[in-house]
Image: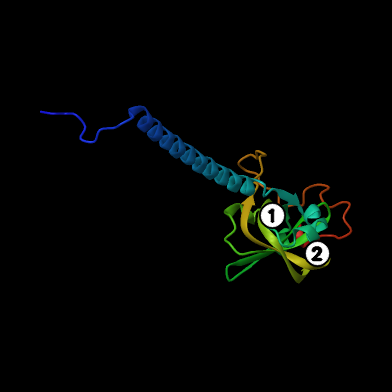
Amino acid sequence: MDLSPRNEVENPGEFRRKVHRNRRWAVLAATVVLIAAAGFITAQGLRNATLFFRNVDEAVEQRPELVDRRFRIQGRVIPSTVRSESGVTTFQITHGCVVAFVQHTADPPELFTSPWIPVVLEGQWVSSQAQTVAGVDTHHFQSDRMLVKHTNEYASVNEQRVSEKLPKGFLNDCAFEVSASES
């Protein structure tokens, strides 16, 4: 049996160099594609990670820059302002003596019913007339995602876990008041 190649290669060294060169280009192209894919995935992750939150007072102050962007806003829910109708929950949040009206379109978490609960909401400003406990506002915050911060204080079995009263000194320096029925 004859095992010699049918087509004689005149210069075997040149043939090996061409094959090796083609392999190098294929490996280089695959490496570039993998690096580009990793860069794209990293950029997407960083874009989501840079969606940091602002307190209500900061968000209202920076409203002109934030009008077209999604961001997170943090504040305490004013208990008497919470209303739910047709799957939309409206309420007001406050921080630093500034109040924002919120329209939340998803189901709020169970802990949301606790009075003066701290929340972080994700969404954006929408131009509209909104009446708050601090007066009329030109925008409301349209939210579709809510994170509720639970208290880390321990309470005995016979006491209420979350105080239904306004946190001590929380609104002392504010120009508006929350009535007794709101605290």
Count the labels in the image: 2
Q: Quadrant of residue 112?
A: bottom right
Which element carries disc 2, helix, strand or loop? Answer: loop
The quarter of the rendered structure image containing the C terminus is bottom right
Which element carries disc 1, helix, strand or loop? Answer: strand
Q: Quadrant of residue 39?
A: top right
Going by the numbered disc 1, the residue's amino acid type is Phe
Picture coordinates of residue 169 (x, y %)?
A: 83, 47
Picture coordinates of residue 34 (x, y %)?
A: 50, 41
Q: Is residue 135 left or right of residue 112?
A: right
Which disc is residue 14 wearing?
A: none
Identify the residue under disc 2: 133
Picture coordinates of residue 97 (x, y %)?
A: 84, 55
Going by the numbered disc 2, the residue's amino acid type is Val
Which of disc 1 and disc 2 is earlier in sequence? 1
Identify the residue under disc 1: 71
The quarter of the rendered structure image containing the N terminus is top left
